[in-house]
Image (spheres, grey):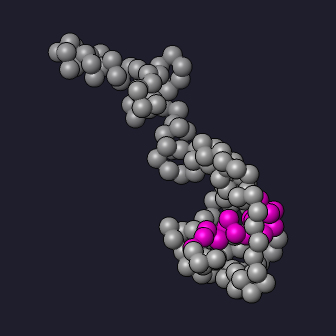
Amino acid sequence: MNYFSISQSDLERFESKFVRVSESQCWPWTGRLDNGYGRFWLNNRTALAHRIAYLIVNGTIPESLHLDHLCRNRACVNPKHLEPVDIKTNVLRGFGFSAENARKTHCKNGHPLNENNLYKMSRKTRVCRICQNNRLKKWRGINAD
């Protein structure tokens, strides 16, 4: 978004929907939430409240970047808690399935997931080479160690 403007009445309405505790603490959104993120009606459509807060303070969000909540609180609209990052960084900092798997250092059987023991599947998933070899041996009817 290259240019952002908001009327004084919309700004006042927006500021009535969150609690500004201090400059360093989270500013929780008290209006409508959608999947934990604040929503605000602006210019005949709904918009994410944290994006509006960031735009009010900074004017723009760099193209192709997403705003990451450094505080991990989706309902927070404090612009100081938001950082523009690429989507990969944003996803990997989170707690979703992809992020949790990326942080794993060992497979469920305790084998290390390092360069020597890592098999990358076609969909960019990581598999323990020892466990994969044991599965294949079992499937082929060979006694797995």
In percent of width and height, residue 51 lies at 68, 65
- Percent from the top left, x then y, of residue 127? 41, 27
Position of residue 90 relative to residue 57, above or below, is above
Depth check, front residue: 54 or 142: 54
Residue at screen point 76% across, 72% down: 5
The outermost residue toward the left is 141
Viewer-nearest residue: 66 or 128 = 66
* Residue closest to the eye, 97 or 111: 97
Quadrant of the frame with the C terminus: top left
Toward which corner of the image does residue 134 lie, by quadrant?
A: top left
Q: Quick check: 54 left or right of 48?
A: right
Q: Magenta includes 136?
A: no
Q: What's drawn in magenta, residue-wise?
A: 46-60
In the image, farthest residue toward the top: 142
| Magenta span: chief secondary structure | helix
Where residue 47 appears, as percent x and y from the top left, is 60, 70
The N terminus, quarter of image: bottom right
Front residue of 63/29: it is: 63
Q: Residue at x 65, y 71 (%)?
A: 49
Identify whether 110 is placed above or below 85: above
Residue 58 against residue 126 in the figure, above or below: below
Task: Identify whether 113 is placed above or below 87.
Answer: above
Q: Measured from the top left, where is residue 121 in percent x and y?
A: 41, 26
Q: Tell me: 48 left or right of 8.
A: left
Using the rendered image of the protein, determine whether residue 72 is visible from the camera's viewpoint: yes
Circle count: 0
Is residue 110 among the parts visible in the rendering? no
Residue drawn at (64%, 77%) of the image: 42
